[in-house]
Image (tube, rainbow, N blue to C red):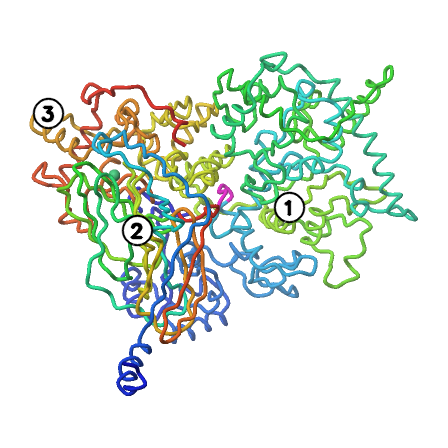
Amino acid sequence: MVLKDASGAPLVEKKAEWNGHSTNPGLLAMEEDKHPEKPLDERVATACSDKDTVAAFEDAAKTNPYDVKPVFRTHPHRWDLLVKEHNPETFGCTTCHGGEGSQTKGVMHRKFRHGEDDHDWNDPLTDEVTVMGKKYKGAFMQAKCDKCHYQEYTLADAPLLSKGKKLFTDVGCWGCHPIEGYNDLAKRGPTLTNIASKTAQGWAHTWISYPKGWRPATRMPNFWPGAVDPLAVPHPEGQSAEQVLATQQKLREQEVSAIVAYLWSNSEKAPLLVSAAPKGDPARGKEIFESVGCKGCHVAEKGSTARRSEGSSERDYAPNLWNVADKAKPEWIYSWVKNPKAMWPETKMPDLRLKDAEAADVTAYLLTLKSDQSYPEPKYGAGEQDRLAAQGKDLIAKYGCFGCHNIKGFENAQKIGTELTEHGIKAKELLDFGDVQYFTEDPRHRQTYVNWVWQKLHVPRTFAYERVETKMPQFDFTDDESLAILTFLKGQIGERPDAQYLTGQTEQQAAVFKGERLVFWNGCRNCHVVEKRGGKIRDQFNEDNQSFAPPVLTGEGAKVQPHWLFGFLKGPFDLRPWLTLRMPTFHFTDQDATDLVHYFAASSSKSFPYLTAEAPQLTGDRLKQTEGLFAELQCTKCHVVGQLRPNQDPGSAAPNFLLAKERLRPDWIPIWLKNPQALLDGTRMPSFWDFSDEAHPTSPSKAFDGDARRQIDALRDYLMHLELKQVPPPKTAMRDVNSHG
Amino acid sequence: MTCSRLLALCAAVLLPMAAMAESIEGEVNFTGKAPTPGKLHREADPYCAKKPMTDPAVLVKGGKLENVWVHVTKGAKDAASVPSSVVSMDQKDCMYTPRMTTAVVGQKIQAKNGDPVLHNVHTYMGASTLFNKGMPNEKAAPIETTAKDEGMMKWKCDVHPWMRGYIGISKNGLQAISSDSGSFKIDNVPPGKYTVEAWHEKYGTKTQEVTVEAGKPAKVIFKYDGTEKGGA
Ligand SMILES: [Cu+2]
């Protein structure tokens, strides 16, 4: 990733540039200067030991000095990505292409040059992979990026790997599969220790039986795929599809009843705030739901795909609420929206600081969101629930439900899945293809690693046979999703190169990567543009009301003071009280808030912790001239001082000047004033000075002899010391925000 | 006097003109119920408050729609020569004047502030900002710019959100704005087949095909009923 500072200049770790082997006289001269002692040709040979290839380099270099290495010609973005970022002289070939050391020739009778021949890397120097007879380009080269970039969630040049990693994290594969780097994440699914306070057994039965049947975009997988599609499980000899389906459905009915019985027998009371939801106004609740920010993460419309997770276009970021009243009890909904983390400490859902009446209204609205489906409650005979619960306990242990959910009695249970830390180099002999024969009949369908993973992801029970029961549930991954996960898995090789090759080794990069994980996990990008990406909720806004949208947080670290940001993250307040959207309280720990502040500072290459920048107090004539300038530019036509001016249209309101001295970095103010559009494209803040000719900037004012730089510095100092008493107080109360939609 | 008697003369005068250019003319009808322009909330700025105004976004008179940009999008062969005149967009009484005008790619555009209060000139092409400059008062130096790309250049003031202005920019210069009687006339159109597009700030785009023949102006009628959405 390329980091930029506030002025837009790229901020990258300096790496040795490819100093190749060009006949371009300019480049050659440059290189001779730097390494006069070492002939260029020799250095090429150390990158690739293949003499034929080297000879080919030489040849092509004669005709096109910029295309010095024909072998690299097919590399995507070869100048930026290969030559600049991964100079083959430093990284060699096998770092990315696999294989041993600098080896490029076949070893003995083995046919491969780079790559692992037993892993169906069918053309070792390309990134193409054949899965189930179909060729996928671009996949496996990206898998190798994870070797050094394992701390990063988004690699611009490895979109499949990034997607796979996000999907892997998001879906919660690590709940069952131990895998280094993901083992300490919070459980992906809601706690079930208080499930009886949340819903009824009838609903839980329907849900567990087939989650996607109830909510198609859920992450929760199907544990009885054969009960939905008989082809999802191997057929015992002599059984028809109808018979298999009937058997599977019967099995599901028994097993789900047992699991539900266990969960209800072991559910504690949730810390509900009320025993019955207070009466509320659903219409008002809908208004609140649509205006405070719920829609950044949720939709409440059947079939809507507007809020998908970052890792998958198939799965919702947060539950679609169109039928939520079928599921959740009124008193639960009320308590939940008031403070989600009290009910489930690890939930991603933040606290919107709803007042009691607001929560009651929102609850009343959510209770209107229901379908006409019915969910019959189980009736237990004497002792039946206990008997079922005992079976349920074994089933929960078998299926590993505790991998994603907190369940009483399974606090210390171990993950039930295969370790994936080195899965990418697993030999196919170690993969159990069971009784599945069809791979071998068609030469395109060979028993290969990728075919096995692909099949496992699509139809996880496919390899089950008499002696071996497979337990992996079916996620209904699409081909796109499967390819992404396959790419991610292929990159898990349990091997890390020397620290010098890894990213994230500098303090700055480490802070950025750590912060990116927090940003991803907490869904910050659903509302904010964070460092140039995200801001989904902006689809609710247009250019006329864009000032009501959540702020863009690109370059935030260059803009705000760290201690202010820390305080704001810990206890957000209404920075712009005229907005209806609220920054929710995430109840960040001190560590997470510190990491986020550090993230923003590092992303803007600002020092962390903060170093005070000077903004001298204005006095005498300088103060007088600045006051004149401040009045002349009419900054308070938009900028609020304390609160909105009488009759001020909230659509025209700009941030409160009184917060500047606590909030803004003084060194940011002049950069902002010089050219607001450069920092925030499309901002409503106009430029008053024209710096297109840096030597002779123009100003609309005669203050300070018309000197733009002195004017800007003076305004910075003025703002950094601004007190309410310096500006005339507003005369009337603030206008009703809603009257001016 | 008829042409039959002076055939030679008639041919000499009429034929070259017909071959050179005709016009596309017509009107923009509004068939729905015309909305009553709402009062603009200009109270926030005491200067603007002195002159109450209603919203000029939709102007309908006698079933005719004003301020529709009608322009040739396809079929024109040549780029127009760039007029030496300057298109002006002024800010007067906290409103852009004119509401809508046209420019040819390459033509100079100038913006002045005639008010003793701050306006910021925030221009857009689509959703992208072109520039955003503050003009604190009538003494502010005019903004000089040049029409760069084809399309609708939108002008907004963020201090006074009701202020809007529009400059339709085209390469071929075959364009007009409908008048208060809904009529428009695009001159100097060589014979040929054209696609003509109408654009209204609230009701968006309509297109029509038209064939211009030598010797007679082509007629185009656009119809809006007020249910359309689009524009900006
Ligand atoms: Cu204005």
Compute the Cα span from label 1 to label 3. 68 Å
In the displayed structure, does residue A168 sit left or right of residue A77? right
Q: What residue is shown with label 3? A: A619
Name the mark on residue A479.
none
Query: Label 1 amino acid?
Result: His
Q: What residue is shown with label 1? A: A423
Q: Residue at x 28, y 24 (%)?
A: A646
A11 is within the stretch colored magenta: no
The quarter of the rendered structure image containing the C terminus of chain A is top left
Per the rendered image, the range of residues in magenta is A150-154
In the displayed structure, does residue A636 sit left or right of residue A468? left
Q: Chain of mark 2?
A: B
Question: Residue B34, percent across and down?
Answer: 42, 43
Identify the secondary structure beneath mark 2: strand
Observer-nearest of B51 and B72: B51
Identify the secondary structure beneath mark 1: helix
Q: Chain of mark 1?
A: A
Observer-nearest of B126 and B53: B53
Q: Which mark sits nearer the N-terminus, 1 or 3? A: 1
Q: What residue is shown with label 2? A: B100
Q: Chain of mark 3?
A: A
